[in-house]
């Protein structure tokens, strides 16, 4: 999958987060669930692990558990409930090595590491819902999703990596700051910080993918495109906690 297609997938996933976040927490949870399932299907193929179906099932289970825990959590900070899901994914990955041994020798550690990292990535998507449930930080979801979508497209706008990086950082930050004018409860400096955080996440992951072989097939490419959106949820949550408290 070429970088522009992967960036488009990132932008679409970020737009889903922004739109569903604007509609409400329930819609956001459904949007994040769709992203989790899509990422979980392709992530084992992206990491080239054996028995990808088992790894997919574990990753989806961890993502759903994290999402449900954050949605049903009664008191803030809501993201603390996600840690149970991350621990469960790690234990499940270790158990899977015993009951479903990887094909070929010497792949147990790689299998556990790949599955656990996939579980952590999809579980971090639940942070978007935690942001939406935090009083005073609801607008940060729309701001972060919009900034991430713009930064993703800007990161592949030309054939020069340096130009793309600078453009993505500037446009992502500017988009976040502009969101402060659309939402009265969101200060411009808060939007600027969220935009910068999301732009940095998009640029760094895009740079990592640029140095790796291109994913073969649609599902690995889809997982590579959605991963930055899910990971950015945790960054937005941390920034939101610093700004809102």
Image (spheres, grey):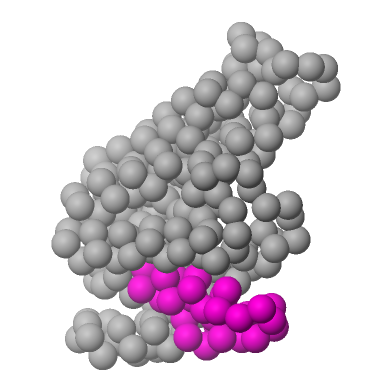
Query: Image height check: is 208 above or below 239?
Result: above
| Residue 106 on the magenta segment | no
Q: Nearer the viewer, residue 237 or 158?
A: 158
Q: Residue at x 29, y 50 (%)?
A: 31
Q: Nearer the viewer, residue 243 or 155?
A: 155
Q: Nearer the viewer, residue 92 or 35?
A: 35
Query: Image height check: is 101 above or below 147?
Result: above
- Toward the right, the furthest residue is 106
Please indicate, yes or no, whether residue 85 appears anywhere in the rendered image.
no
Query: Image height check: is 202 above or below 62?
Result: below
Q: Position of residue 91 (x, y in %)?
A: 57, 24
Magenta-drawn segment: 145-172
Q: Residue at x 57, y 74 (%)?
A: 156
Q: Position of residue 145 (x, y in %)?
A: 37, 68
Please indicate, yes or no, whether residue 114 appears anywhere in the rendered image.
yes
Q: Position of residue 189 (x, y in %)?
A: 40, 88
Q: Position of residue 199 (x, y in %)?
A: 52, 75
> Is residue 147 toward the left or the right of residue 139 in the image?
right
Quarter holding residue 110? top right
Query: Image height check: is 226 above or below 216?
Result: below
> Magenta-highlighted stretch: main secondary structure?
helix
Quarter holding residue 2? bottom right
Q: Residue at x 57, y 75 (%)?
A: 155
- Toward the top, the furthest residue is 99
Which corner quadrant holds the C terminus?
A: bottom left
């Amino acid at each position: 999958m070429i970088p522009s297609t992967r960036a488009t997938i990132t932008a679409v996933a970020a737009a889903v987060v922004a739109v569903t976040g604007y509609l409400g927490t329930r819609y956001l949870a459904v949007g994040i669930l769709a992203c989790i399932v899509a990422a979980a299907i392709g992530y084992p193929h992206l990491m080239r692990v054996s028995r990808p179906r088992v790894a997919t099932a574990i990753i989806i289970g961890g993502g759903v558990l994290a999402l449900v825990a954050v949605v049903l959590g009664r008191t803030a900070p809501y993201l603390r409930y996600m840690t149970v899901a991350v621990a469960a994914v790690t234990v499940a990955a270790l158990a899977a090595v015993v009951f479903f041994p990887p094909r070929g020798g010497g792949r147990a550690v790689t299998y556990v590491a790949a599955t656990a990292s996939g579980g952590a990535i999809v579980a971090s998507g639940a942070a978007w819902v935690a942001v939406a449930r935090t009083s005073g930080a609801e607008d940060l979801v729309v701001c972060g999703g919009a900034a991430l979508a713009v930064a993703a497209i800007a990161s592949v706008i030309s054939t020069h990596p340096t130009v793309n990086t600078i453009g993505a950082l500037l446009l992502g930050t500017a988009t976040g700051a502009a969101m402060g004018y659309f939402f009265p409860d969101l200060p411009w400096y808060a939007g600027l910080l969220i935009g910068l955080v999301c732009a940095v996440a998009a640029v760094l992951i895009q740079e990592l993918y640029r140095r790796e072989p291109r994913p073969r097939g649609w599902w690995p490419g889809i997982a590579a495109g959605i991963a930055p959106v899910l990971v950015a949820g945790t960054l937005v949550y941390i920034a939101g906690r610093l700004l809102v408290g």
